[in-house]
Image (cartoon, rainbow, N blue to C red):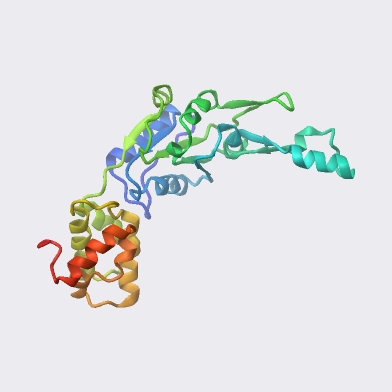
Amino acid sequence: MDMNVFKGSDKYVVTKELMNAVNVAIALEKPLLIKGEPGTGKTMLAEAIADSLGKKLIIWGIKSTTKAQEGLYVYDTVQRLYDSQFGEGNVADIKQYIKLGKLGEAFSSDEQVVLLIDEIDKADLEFPNDLLWELDKMEFYINETKETIKTKHRPIVIITSNAEKELPDAFLRRCIFHYIEFPNREKMEEIIKVHFGDIDRKLSENALEAFYEIREMDDLQKKPSTSELLDWIQALMISGVDIRDIKEKMPFVGVLLKKNQDIDVMNEIKEKGYSLKRW
């Protein structure tokens, strides 16, 4: 077993609880399932782990149409048919038409990698169950070549979910679980310092105050996330906006809010000259 210990990253603010969850998953050789609302740094965690441990990161981004088989391998029958018609290549060698997916790539790597299965809840309900054997045994069978692909070095598997769907119990039993809470103001200040070390203190304070007041507003269709706050701060810094105007005029509000209804509410507040707290 590789004695990998994750101690955080200069580019990623990690809580002690999350750090412990990562290291337990590595030690027990189990996938780490990370849940949390969008924008809480779930995907960036895998990047931080790979960077901290000096390992390659393989990302398998899941879509609604993704099938588990695609992560293992794909048999390119179209290319083989083309080659047979035009006399190109050795069509008898089926192996050359087998293309490994992201899971297959992680299994066959000559070095241990970090494998991110990103937003697993986007796929259909059967998707997690279809991966149970492979994630347990770290191997899969290629029917076309009668070959079993076994992992050379068990990858560190990070799985993210936005909690849009409940995952099957059989799948959950095989994972270490951690929920990333939305950062409080103190933790968010640390995150901002990581990304903008030279930021004006007053700009940071005003932006944070406005950000958390917006998140507390009732009836928002989509609350702004950490990533949107960072984008907003960058826009404020680049534009050189007067710090005093941040809360009063809410410049570049479309960087923070992404729903028409939410922007309309904010524009109404500005037109009436209300502060966020008075509203």
Q: Is residue 148 above or below residue 264?
A: above
Q: Who is closer to the viewer here, 265 or 187?
A: 265
Is residue 256 shown left or right of residue 97? left
Residue 235 locus on image (x, y percent): 34, 70
Is residue 13 shown left or right of residue 168? left
Residue 272 locus on image (x, y percent): 15, 70
What residue is at 77 percent from the left and 42 percent from the top?
Answer: 79
Is residue 106 shown left or right of residue 257? right
What residue is at 34 percent from the left and 64 percent from the top?
Answer: 255
Is residue 86 shown left or right of residue 135? right
Q: Is residue 59 above or below residue 21?
A: below
Q: Who is closer to the viewer here, 36 or 125?
A: 125
What residue is at 28 percent from the left and 69 percent from the top?
Answer: 199
Q: Is residue 33 above or below residue 168?
A: below
- Number of numbered tags placed on the structure image: 0
* Residue 194 at least partly seen: no
Give the quarter of the figure containing the C terminus: bottom left
Q: Residue furthest right?
A: 87
Q: Is residue 114 above or below residue 194?
A: above
Splitting the image into 4 quarters, where does residue 88 fall?
Answer: top right
What residue is at 21 percent from the left and 68 percent from the top?
Answer: 201
* Residue 217 at least partly seen: yes
